[in-house]
Amino acid sequence: MPKSVHQLAKQLEAISQVARKIGTSLNLQETLDAVISAVAELIPCTLAEISLWDADRGLLILRALRCPSERSFPLGHTFPPGKGYTGWIVKEKKPLFVHDVAHRRDIKPDLLPGEKPFRSYIGIPLIAGEELIGTLVLIHEKAAAFTPDDVGIVETMAGYAAAAIHKARLYEQLSHRHHELSALYSIAETLNPPLNLEQLMRQALTRVIDVTGADGGAIRLLDKAGQSLLLATHQGLSENYVRHAESFPLSEEIVGWVARERQPSLSQDMWTDPRVSSHIRELLKEVGHRALAQVPLIAQDRVVGTLGLVSRTPGFFTQDDLQLLNAIGQQLGMAIANAQLFEETQQRAQRLAALNAMATVINQALDLETLLGSAAEKILEVTRSDAALIGLVNPETNSLQITQAGKISGEFTKWYQDDYLNRQGRKSFFTQGETLIIADTLDFSFPAEVVRSRIIGEGIRSWLGVPLQSGKKIIGLLDVISCKPQTFSGEDVELLQAIGHQLGTAIENTCLRQEAIISERLVAVGRVASTVVHDLKGPLSGIINSADFLARRNLSPQIRKKMCEGIMAAARRLISTVQGILDYTREGQMTTSFSACSLPNFLHEVVNVFQVDFDKRNIKVDLQLAYRGEVKIDSDKMAQVIHNILANARDAMPEGGQLTISSRKKEDWLEISFDDTGPGVPPELNERIFEPFFSYHKKKGAGLGLSIARRIVEEHGGRIWVEKAESEGARFIVLLPLS
């Protein structure tokens, strides 16, 4: 049976809450427990479990479980996937839904020792990218316990869970490595102060120059591609040399040979050494550097860079100096490698923290405009850029709408949105899933000079843009902009792409949530409208019937007066009913006006409005009033309460019956009871019939009558409830204070 919009909205909200909860945790076990608890609460089941896949051993490891104690297995229990349902999921990497185990012939469940048989099964592979990281399984001892809708919910949860588990496992591995490196540095602290990479190289070079008496020196690091040596730190070199010798290919100069051959080298006089190019020779002559000692920096048989010292004195360095420098290079190479690894670990941890911070913002239940604004601000923070742009495709107009944050003018954003994106061509670029990388706008080839002038005129020097995606669907673009030129690494691109996927999914979820809310509001409006029609129809029918009766010629003046009074009372109740509905929908306190009135006169007046209806349906009314004194009430509001009870009694006895209205005093309370001979109310619904929008055995109305009645009675300091009458029908009891 299809789910209602209200049910779907509740499920979406539950899934959104779980996504926010697991998206803000980097603890693996907390993430697993949150996922399994949420799934078990959404989908009733006998057992729910998450097992993680150990590819090296070919085993599943039970990590989270929700089940009765008699079915429990210890967490950490390992088991092969076998040939049954779980084995099929691991092999095929596809969801498996078994409506009834007894009717599934092609695959049989492979029960673990001590595991009880089951009848219904849902198994979902947890996949991050293309990697299987585990399984999410729900079973039930009864057949047909799960529906295809349940499978869809579990698949949605599994998508969030897989990403969160993958992130938590990666963070766990990085934290473990970070812990190892921290321990290594804590040991080294007894010999040397703890240093980051830049400090380590700078202070190491200073120390080596002091020890050897050299005039200057430099440390170069091998780039990630392993093709060039980049100047990392230096002392005593000319600005001109630094500017023109910032990078050397491995195929050039003495430093390239040292790194390539992994051997130290001496040059007694670089001004005459043929291994030195004429260009570099002229740069060295500017400050008079003649002698060179160059050694490789090696860590675990891997070259990480070079260490070179220079002197103005030809032949300054000896073979002994070279041997000492080579030994220092071995130690320094390992220290640099460790510092690089430590720095990379910190950078990855920072990226994970950035993703976690983004998840905290974008997984909140926000409207779309607020979500985009908050996300743009958070992207500025985590990427340390000067401006961020988020563009969404409007499917109706096929145009892009930009949300901006940071140091960029609204005029530029409007031009970028209207003239460039929607007219000149970047849209086709990102819709093909391509990434835009501009390290320096001054060197970039733009499609038109006007584009170049506008971007450079805005002060923009570097630009990184990725598609904004939800799953495989491209829904917009995400750009970060800087006022300084910079080289974007692969990690920078991956981080922005990951943020783009996170944000894209959040945008899709927000749009779905807003659509569900709009649908829910429309349904609520329909219900309220139906209630207004229903609650006004009764008094109007009384007025019409009374007016029709009043048109008869042979009525006595007393009867005419009585009917006119009934019409006026019904009209007043119409006004009171409308005000009551307004008060209810506004959820504010009702306006009440108390005054003393005669209980018999009050009840007779309300009953008279229904008298014509009761006569037509052959309903006899018997007033048994043991208490006939006064009561202090808001007569219009309380008339609405009695009206709703009488209308329910009338509708419950379409073929006629008996309605008994009685009153009695109980200490300081007045009890008014209404007994009908209708079918009654099932005991399990005694409370629910007072809930808003709940109707029982009524084809019309939206179920607000008794809810409003309870609120009016409670405003009087009393109570209203329903129970079984002696006639087997319903007995409504109104209890009001007399003092």
Image (cartoon, rainbow, N blue to C red):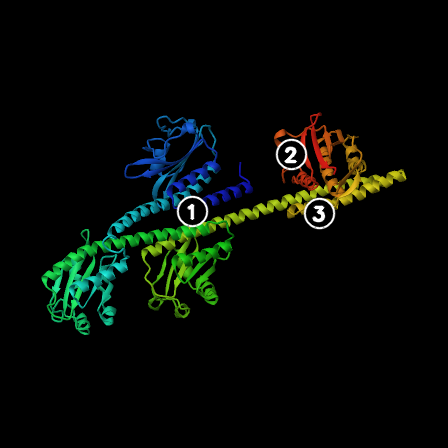
Quadrant housing residue 681: top right
Identified by mark 3, the residue type is: Thr
Q: Which residue is mark 3?
A: 591
Camera-near label (2 vs 3) is: 3
Marks 1/3: CA distance?
47 Å
Residue 473 shows in the view = no
Camera-near label (1 vs 3) is: 3
Residue sticking out furthest to the bottom: 286
Q: Could you tell whether 256 is left or right of 513 in the image?
A: left
Q: Position of residue 391 (x, y in %)?
A: 45, 58
- Name the image quarter holding the C terminus: top right
Of marks 2 and 3, which one's residue comes earlier in the chain? 3
Identified by mark 2, the residue type is: Tyr
Marks 1/2: CA distance?
43 Å
Q: Secondary structure at mark 3?
A: loop
Q: Could you tell whether 723 is left or right of 570 in the image?
A: left
Quadrant housing residue 461: bottom left
Height in image: 371 above or below 423? above
x 42%, y 47%: residue: 23
Q: Which residue is mark 2?
A: 696
Residue 668 - label: none
Of marks 1 and 2, which one's residue comes earlier in the chain? 1
Residue sticking out furthest to the front: 190
Q: Secondary structure at mark 1?
A: helix
Residue 515 shows in the view = yes
Marks 2/3: CA distance?
29 Å
Q: Secondary structure at mark 2?
A: loop
Quadrant housing residue 486: bottom left
Q: Nearer the viewer, residue 659 or 171?
A: 171
Identified by mark 1, the residue type is: Gly
- The residue carrying pointer 3 sits among few (fewer than 14), some (14 to 19) or many (20 or more) residues within 10 Å by Cα, namely few
Q: Which residue is mark 1?
A: 23
